[in-house]
Image (cartoon, rainbow, N blue to C red):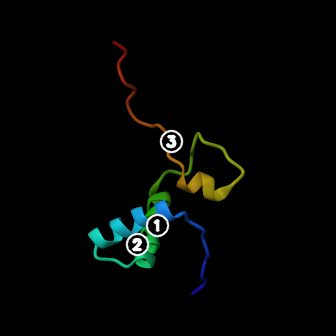
Amino acid sequence: MPRITINITDDEQKILKKRADKNFFSLIEQVEDIVRRSCISQKNKSKNRDFKCDDRLVSIFSKSNRGRKKKKK
């Protein structure tokens, strides 16, 4: 299995560690779970996206505003 190295700040590590403890995961397992869920979510989305970007990772992890528009008051 290939390994990927990412750099995160101490603040980000604290947040991920807290989330991992809540889910009974280690820090590495939590990051793997986040990436896995994101990939599954991306696979289930439709192929036609309004957001066009050259960077594949940016397009995978970016959210687009979809759905019913809010009513103006």
At label 3, the amino acid type is Ser
Upstream in the sequence, badge 1 or badge 3?
Answer: 1
Quadrant into which the C terminus falls: top left
Q: Residues within 10 Å of mark 3 (few under 14, many from 20)?
A: few
Q: In whole angstroms, how far apart are the C-alphas of marks 1 and 2?
A: 11 Å
Looking at the picture, does residue 1 appear above or below residue 46?
A: below
Label 3's element?
loop
Label 2's element?
helix
Q: Are marks 1 and 3 in contact (CB under 8 Å)?
A: no
- Image coordinates for residue 47, horizontal then vertical, percent: 55, 51
Q: Which residue is mark 2?
A: 30
At label 2, the amino acid type is Gln
Q: Residue at x 44, y 59 (%)?
A: 41
Q: Which mark is residue 49?
A: none
Looking at the picture, does residue 65 appear above or below residue 58?
A: above
Q: Residue at x 61, y 84 (%)?
A: 2
